[in-house]
Amino acid sequence: MKSFRELVNDCLDTVDEVFPWDLKNLMESEQSPLLIDVREPHEFDTLHIKGSINVPRGILESSYETQPKLVTARDKDVVVVCHAGLSSVLATHTMIHKMGFQSVKSLKTGVKGWNDFDQPLQNIHGQEVDGDEAEKILKQIKNST
C-alpha cells in the first residue's frame, strides 16, 4: 500500500504546478484563473485566497456537476489550492484525468506558501488576516490534522 506522499509523487509527472509568485501574476492578468480551495470548510472559513471557492477534496468529484462555477470551468484556467500543495496535486490530477478539465494547475506550497510570499489572505467575512496571525492559524490547522 502506498503512503500519501507516494500517491502525490506518482501524480507529479502529470500535474503542472505554479509557485505563489506565478499565481499572483496570473491573478493580475485579464484571464485570471478560477481558484478552487480543496481544504475543509472550517479551514477555508478561517483564511483563504481572495476570490477562491471552497470545494473540499472529499466532495470534489460529486461537486463538479452541481457547483455552478465548476460546471462552467472545464475549458477555463483553474488553480487548485490546499494547505501545503500536496492534496491539490491529487485533486488536480483527478480533475484533468478523470473529470475532463483542460487547464488545471496546483499551487505549489499551498496557502502556506502564499502567506510566506506575503500575499493577502482573508476570512469568510472578507476581512484580511494578518500574515503573522495567518501563520499561527496554519500551524494550528496542521497540528490538528
Image (tube, rainbow, N blue to C red):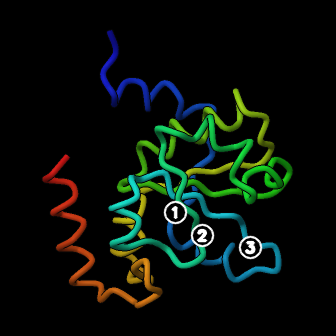
Q: Residue at x 65, y 77 (%)?
A: 25
Tag 2: amino acid: Leu
> Callout 3 environment at 10 Å: few (<14), some (14 to 19), or many (20+)?
some
Percent of width and height locating residue 128? 40, 90
Q: Nearer the viewer, residue 113 or 97?
A: 97
Q: Residue at x 41, y 65 (%)?
A: 44
Tag 3: amino acid: Ser
- Whether residues under marks 2 and 1 lie with C-beta atoms below 8 angstroms apart, the answer is yes
**Residue marked by disc 1:** 19
As drawn, 15 above or below 67: above
**Gap in angstroms between the C-alphas marked 2 and 1:** 6 Å
Marks 3 and 1: which is nearer the front? 3
Q: Is residue 53 left or right of residue 124?
A: right
Percent of width and height locating residue 35? 62, 63
Earlier in the chain: of badge 3 and badge 2, it is 2
**Residue marked by disc 2:** 23
Query: Helix, strand, or loop for circle 1?
Result: loop
Percent of width and height locating residue 83? 36, 56
Q: Is residue 123 left or right of residue 102?
A: left
Q: Residue furthest top?
A: 1
Tag 1: amino acid: Phe
Earlier in the chain: of badge 3 and badge 1, it is 1
**Where does the N terminus fall, quadrant-wise?**
top left
**Residue marked by disc 3:** 32
Query: Helix, strand, or loop for circle 3?
Result: loop
- Whether residues under marks 3 and 1 lie with C-beta atoms below 8 angstroms apart, the answer is no
